[in-house]
Amino acid sequence: MSFWPDQRVFVTGGGGFLGRHVLAHLKARGCGQVRAPRRAECDLRDPAATQRELERFRPTLILHLAALCGGIEANRLQPGTFFYDNAIMGIQLIEAARRLGVAKTVVLGTVCAYPKFTPVPFREEDLWNGYPEETNAPYGLAKKMLLVQLQAYRLQYGFRGVFLLPVNLYGPWDNFDLTTSHVIPALIRKMEEARRSGATSVGLWGSGAASREFLYVDDCAEGILLAAERYDAPEPTNLGTGSSVTIRDLAEKVARAVGYTGRLDWDPTRPDGQPKRQLDTSRAREQFEFEAKTSLDDGLAQTVAWFREHFRA
């Protein structure tokens, strides 16, 4: 706790899904000097705006959470935008931080950066052993370039940059738009709307055979702050639970969580995405004592409760 009161923390993406939770955790730690500008105040794609914002606030720590992200369909429709926005925001922010002499920068990557056929569990050493799954490769590669930049800057300039690889996140304040959302919020919305309307079936993408690991967003926020406090090395670090579930089993869990009893109709003509995702989380546990606390069933129950309270469409 003594680390945080003296920090001046600049948070990108503070108005987003993960950012809201990180800001709440910073407040709980007694960090009173926090700047989290929205895009209208500081568009990270504009290098001059980024430089000005950092010069005004003079942070000691940057948490780069901002990202353009979405599910398979969003990545399929806008691969160029997903690549450009994610690469340019991070590259320019890291360069501005280097010029200003920011003491430490923590950058969020993505599990999408891993090769399509990475052996399970994904170990950080496997990150460069192949090409990412095609449907989200531009996003994953854009994020992975920020790891290259951080490592190069550490070697040349002594820049203290940390790169974290969170697995798929879910929880309150997630994106429930069916065009751009990830799998858990999409399943919750589809099944809750089907329950309310009395629909006898719900159509779902893919075969259901792919497996995924999911990290509750509050656990991720805790992992980020622990890394900021305790980790300072060039190697990337996974953030996850270390366990996975098939999409078919996940859908059945969501159905139980919302109380939907209708039929689940799978469409195998739609893409499954990467066949398997499950992380080796030992480095985070050993290096900065991070372990996820929230079970998938408990996290789903909390997310469904939040959705019912806040979503009125």
Image: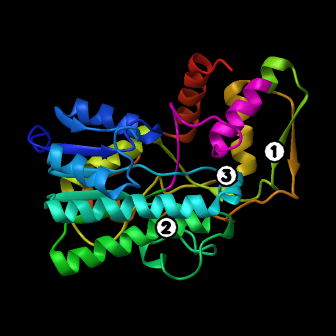
Q: Is residue 262 visible?
A: yes
Farthest residue toward the right? 200
The one of 99 and 232 positioned closer to us in this rendering:
99
The one of 258 and 59 positioned closer to us in this rendering:
59
189 in magenta: yes
Q: Residue at x 86, y 48 (%)?
A: 266
- Identify the residue position indicated by label 2 in the image: 142
The one of 21 and 251 positioned closer to us in this rendering:
21
- Identify the residue position indicated by label 3 in the image: 74
Residue type of the residue flagged with mark 1: Leu
Q: CA distance from mark 2 to mark 1?
A: 29 Å
Q: In the picture, residue 41 is in which quadrant?
A: top left
Left/right placement of residue 223 relative to residue 134 reads left
Query: For the C terminus, which image quadrant?
Result: top right
Provide residue 28's location: percent of width, then percent of height.
24, 30
- Identify the residue position indicated by label 1 in the image: 204
Q: Is 109 situated above or below 310? A: below
The span shown in magenta is 167-193
| Between discs 3 and 2, the one toward the N terminus | 3
Left/right placement of residue 268 relative to residue 180 reads right
**Which secondary structure, mark 2?**
helix
| Between discs 1 and 3, the one toward the N terminus | 3
Q: Residue at x 81, y 55 (%)?
A: 206
Residue type of the residue flagged with mark 3: Ala
